[in-house]
Image (spheres, rainbow, N blue to C red):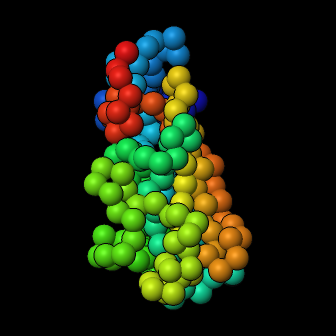
């Protein structure tokens, strides 16, 4: 009879002395504010959108079909772009390249509209020349709209031959100080 309590006591003391009991983790209270808010990474958001577009075209488009990226433009002024518009185009292009698609480098071409500070724009009267000269099959184009706290982006992969949109993706990002700077939007 004495044997059971003695074994229990020895095992209990061994666990306490040996540190085998799990430590209680402390979690912050829900009402405690975070010290630094960090918005989701812009590149990760753009890559997720590009991945969705790649999934949409994987059965329809051969990877050797050349894609011509155009700078994304602000919905308020379709004739100009910003560093944000150029970066969105570059990040989307990078993700398509990583997925194995053929991306044409516009800056290496001399007969496309390329204006300093304005990016590469696809003009409707240039489509046939682009298709014939550069053997581009599709254009990666997009636009963005700046709201109070977010930037809403639309990206499309358009077949040059007939203007059909093969894939499209809408996404948004928090208007962080870095994104404000890329958009040339004043800080509050």
Instruction: Choose between 138 and 153: the one closer to the eye.
Output: 138
Instruction: Choose between 67 and 27: the one closer to the eye.
Output: 67
Which of the 4 quarters of the picture holds residue 52? bottom right
Q: Position of residue 36 (x, y in %)?
A: 35, 23
Examine the rendered structure and indicate whether residue 3 appears above or below residue 95.
above
Q: Position of residue 113 (x, y in %)?
A: 39, 65
Which of the 4 quarters of the picture holds residue 65? bottom right
Query: Can see residue 95?
Result: no
Q: Position of residue 43 (x, y in %)?
A: 41, 51
Residue placed farthest to the top in the image? Answer: 31
Is 168 left or right of 92, judged from the image as shown?
right
- Total marks shown come to 0
Query: Can see residue 116?
Result: yes
Is 151 left or right of 59, judged from the image as shown?
left
The quadrant in which the C terminus is found is top left
Instruction: Choose between 25 and 28: the one closer to the eye.
Output: 28
Give the residue drawn at x 34%, y 39%: 182
Give the residue drawn at x 36%, y 51%: 118
Examine the rendered structure and indicate whether residue 98 appears above or below residue 49.
below
Give the residue drawn at x 52%, y 33%: 146
Is 112 left or right of 62, judged from the image as shown?
left
Examine the rendered structure and indicate whether residue 121 appears above or below residue 64.
above
Give the residue drawn at x 45%, y 22%: 27
The quadrant in which the N terminus is found is top right
Q: Position of residue 134 (x, y in %)?
A: 44, 84
């Amino acid at each position: 009879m004495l044997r059971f309590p003695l074994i229990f006591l020895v095992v209990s003391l061994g666990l306490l002395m040996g540190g085998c009991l799990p430590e209680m983790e402390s979690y912050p209270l829900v009402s405690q504010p975070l010290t630094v808010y960090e918005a989701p990474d812009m590149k990760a958001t753009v890559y997720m959108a590009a991945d969705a577009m790649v999934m949409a075209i994987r059965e329809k488009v051969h990877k050797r079909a050349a894609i011509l990226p155009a700078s994304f433009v602000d919905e308020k002024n379709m004739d100009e772009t910003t560093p944000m518009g150029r970066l969105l185009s570059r990040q989307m292009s990078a993700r398509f390249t990583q997925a194995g698609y053929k991306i044409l480098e516009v800056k290496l071409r001399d007969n496309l509209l390329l204006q300093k500070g304005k990016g590469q724009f696809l003009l409707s009267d240039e489509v046939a020349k682009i298709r014939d000269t550069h053997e581009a099959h599709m254009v990666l184009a997009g636009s963005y709209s700046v709201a109070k706290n977010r930037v809403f982006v639309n990206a499309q992969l358009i077949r040059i031959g007939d203007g059909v949109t093969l894939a499209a993706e809408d996404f948004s990002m928090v208007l962080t100080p870095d994104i404000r700077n890329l958009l040339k939007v004043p800080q509050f």
